Amino acid sequence: MKSSHLEKFEVVISDSSFEDDKVEKEVLKQIDAKVKFFQCRSEEEIATVAREADALLNDHLPLSGKTLSSLNKVRIIVRCAIGYDNIDLEKATEKRIIVCNVPDYCINEVADHTLSLILALARKIPWINAATKAGEWNWRRFAPMYRLEGKTAGIIGFGRIGREVAKRLKAFGLRVIAFDPYLPREVFESIGAVQVGLEELLSEADIISVHCPLTRETYHLIDREKFRLMKKTAIFVNVARGAIVDEKALYQALKKKQIQAAGLDVFETEPLEKDNPLLELDNIVLTPHIAWYSEEAEIAVRKSAAEEVVRFFSGVKPKNVVNPQVLKYYPELKEA
C-alpha cells in the first residue's frame, strides 16, 4: 500500500506499559515494518513521536482531536485494550483513520477478578486477614456474614465479560439478573439470567457488578440517586471504567453505610490520587486496574494489536474495527 516497495511501514508503539516491543516486532516483521517503541507520558509526546507514523498502537493515554489532527500519515490506530473511550472516534473517522480495539484478550481474567472481589467482600477476607495477623482471634467481630447461595446478583452490561461473570455467580448458587438495553432477551436466557430494568436491578440485587462500556450515556450512570436505591447490605463492584460511577456519590454511600461495601479496579482518575477520599474508608477494597492481567493476557493483547496492523497493510480488513463507517474509504481491503 506504499508508493514504493523500498519504503517500510512505520509503526509507533506510543505509550506502552510493557518493558519492550519483542512481541509486537515478532508479529510486525511479516510486513517488514519499522517499529518505534516509546513509553510516552502525555498526549503531546505522542503527537511528536507519531507525527509521521503509518500506524499507531495506543495503550492508555488519551488521543484527543487535537492530537489526531497532528498525525500526518496514520491510517490505523489499535487500542491495546477492550475500551476505546480514550480516543476521539469522531475525529478519527473524519480523518479516515481506522480505529480498532482488542475485545477478547482478558475475558476470563476480568471475570475471575470480579469474583475475587465479590468473595473477598462477602467473606470480609481483607479485614479478617489484617486482624488475624495482628493477633486477634474473634470471629464475632466480623458478624454478620451471609450465605451467597440463594442471593441475587445484578450485572450491569451483559457483554462477553458480564456473561462470564454470570456463569461464575450461578455456579455459586446465586440468582442472576442483568441490565443491558442493547441485547435481546434470548442472550440473557441463554445464560440463565433474567433481563430487568436498571432500577429494578439496583433495588433487588445483593451484589451489583458493573461491566458496561463508558459512553456519553453511561458517564456517571451510577450516581447518588442510584446508590439510594440499593440495599444497605449491597456489595458493589466496578471493574469496567471508573467514570461510569460518580466516585463522590460512592464515597458518601459507603461512609454513610447506605451500602455494605465496594470493590473497585477502576477509577475516575488513574493512577489513583493519594488524596482520593476513597482511601480513607474501611469498607472498600481497591486494586490498580489489574483485572485484565495474566501472563497469557499480556501476550494475547500485544499479538492481537499487532496482527490488526499486519492485516491492514496486507490488504485485509482488520477484525475489530470500532468505526466501521470509515471502511468505505478503503474499498481495496478484502475480507479475512
Image (cartoon, rainbow, N blue to C red):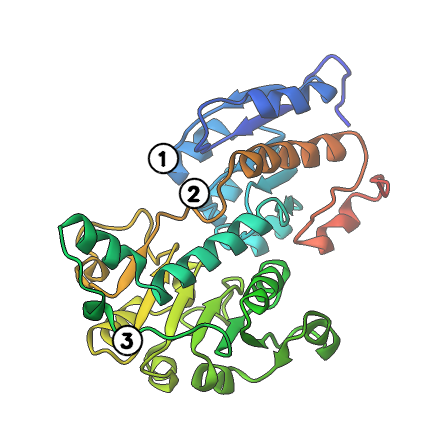
CA separation in Å, label 2 and label 1:
7 Å
Name which residue type carries label 3. Pro
User: Counting other residues with Cα less than 10 Å from the Cα at mark 3, is it few (<14), some (14-19), or many (20 or more)?
Assistant: few
Name which residue type carries label 1. Arg
Residue beneath disc 2:
61
| Quadrant showing the N terminus | top right
Q: Which of 22 and 269 is in front in this view?
A: 22
Looking at the picture, how far across and down is residue 309, in whole percent? 68, 33
* In the displayed structure image, the side of residue 298 where residue 130 appears, left or right: left
Please tell me whether residue 334 is drawn above or below residue 85 in the rendered image. Answer: above
Name which residue type carries label 2. Leu
Helix, strand or loop at label 1? It is loop
Residue beneath disc 1:
41
**Can I make out residue 240 in this image?**
no
Looking at the picture, how far across and down is residue 46, in whole percent? 45, 34
Mark sitting on residue 273: none
Tell me the residue at 47%/27% (across/down): 49
* In the displayed structure image, the side of residue 297 where residue 312 appears, left or right: right
Helix, strand or loop at label 2? It is loop
Tell me the residue at 49%/49% (across/down): 65
Q: Are marks 1 and 3 in contact (CB under 8 Å)?
A: no
User: Counting other residues with Cα less than 10 Å from the Cα at mark 1, is it few (<14), some (14-19), or many (20 or more)?
Assistant: few
| Quadrant showing the C terminus | top right
Q: Nearer the viewer, residue 139 or 225?
A: 139
Looking at the picture, how far across and down is residue 115, in whole percent? 47, 59
Mark sitting on residue 144: 3
Tell me the residue at 36%/59% (across/down): 120
Q: Are marks 2 and 1 in contact (CB under 8 Å)?
A: yes
Looking at the picture, how far across and down is residue 235, in whole percent? 37, 71
